[in-house]
Amino acid sequence: MRRFAFLLAAALAVSTVMAPNAWAAYPGPGHVTGDTGVHDPSVVKRPGGGYLVAHTGDNISLKTSTDRTAFRNAGSAFPGGAPWTTAYTNGSAHLWAPDISYRNGQYYMYYSASTFGSNRSAIFLATSPSGNSGTWTNRGLVVESRSTDNYNAIDPDLVVDDQGRWWLSFGSFWSGIKMIALSSSTGLRADSTLRALAGRNGGPIEAPNIVKRGSYYYLYVSFDYCCRGADSTYRIMVGRSTTVTGPYRDRNGTDLNSGGGTEILASHDNIHGPGHQDVFADTDHDILVYHYYANNGTPLLGINWLTWDPTGWPKVS
């Protein structure tokens, strides 16, 4: 971004007539306070009030908020460790990219175990009656990938369709975003079918999140590169479909399996690499949650409203 700003300034010195910068139109994150250092956040509204955040960290990090503005650390999901994951993490306690939701009177959390750059990976499920640290029970392996596979079993996201069927999307790099059917009674994999939702012919795509609004299911993904501090190029893209299994198409009609995607948020000003998004409906607005990097490389929590244009496409506000 700094190099881009230098080139832009040089171009403006030559000519005063330029097209507006796409990134200049993006709003900054909403105001948040307290413990806002996160990576790969997922947020759920608590039935008794307030919010619970799960994010990447040792044994899955937790945060809480009463008002969606002030956040505080709330320990880890597995304070005693998660030894069932260490075969995929080379013994590390660092677990990635949880997806948290509240269904059937309990919290469900899907989360990833892997090492950076490897697709020897796995997604596990845990449940909890309260969501609090130390109350999570391991429910087992959901899906795994090996080095011989052309996909990567990380970055899970649960969606329940209008017929009450459970689906898990996931994926990072390799051949892109996949989907499997889940059993609604166990939360575990229901069959052997692997569906393809989005891909960039091996290019960087990850962090799927599917939500239903109106007549469409919307698939949000992150393009380009995370985890490089202020040099990160993550950006949030979206496509939509009338069926949960796709095909998902962008605003121009391009299938996300053919590299399509409509950008709704990217780096701008001092906001670097916004991505690994989570969308949920609140009482005031649809809410977009994500992480971004500050100028010093710190990953921070981003929260914005999502508004909708007359044709049913989301816009960050």
Image (cartoon, rainbow, N blue to C red):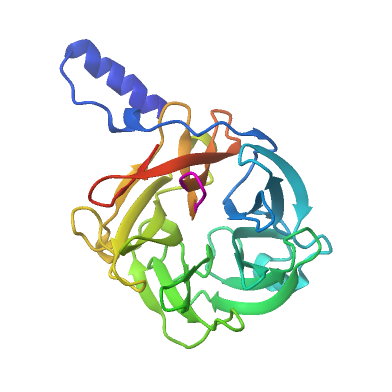
Q: Residue at x 51, y 46 (%)?
A: 290
Residue sitting nearer the eye, 255 or 214: 214
Instruction: Find residue 120 and report its horizontal and vertical position in percent.
Output: 56, 71
Which residues fall within the magenta stretch?
281-286
Q: Answer with the quarter of the image where residue 78 lies.
A: bottom right
Instruction: Find residue 212 and report its horizontal and vertical position in percent.
Output: 39, 62
On screen, residue 70 above or below 102: above
Q: Residue at x 25, y 61 (%)?
A: 249
Q: Residue at x 23, y 50 (%)?
A: 311
Left of 160 or right of it: where is 103? right
**Farthest-out residue, bottom:** 191
Residue 282: in magenta span: yes
**Can I make out residue 201 in this image?**
no
**Can I make out residue 143 in this image?**
yes
Quadrant containing the C terminus in the rendered view: top left
On screen, residue 18 above or below 128: above
Q: Magenta part mainly helix, strand or loop?
A: loop
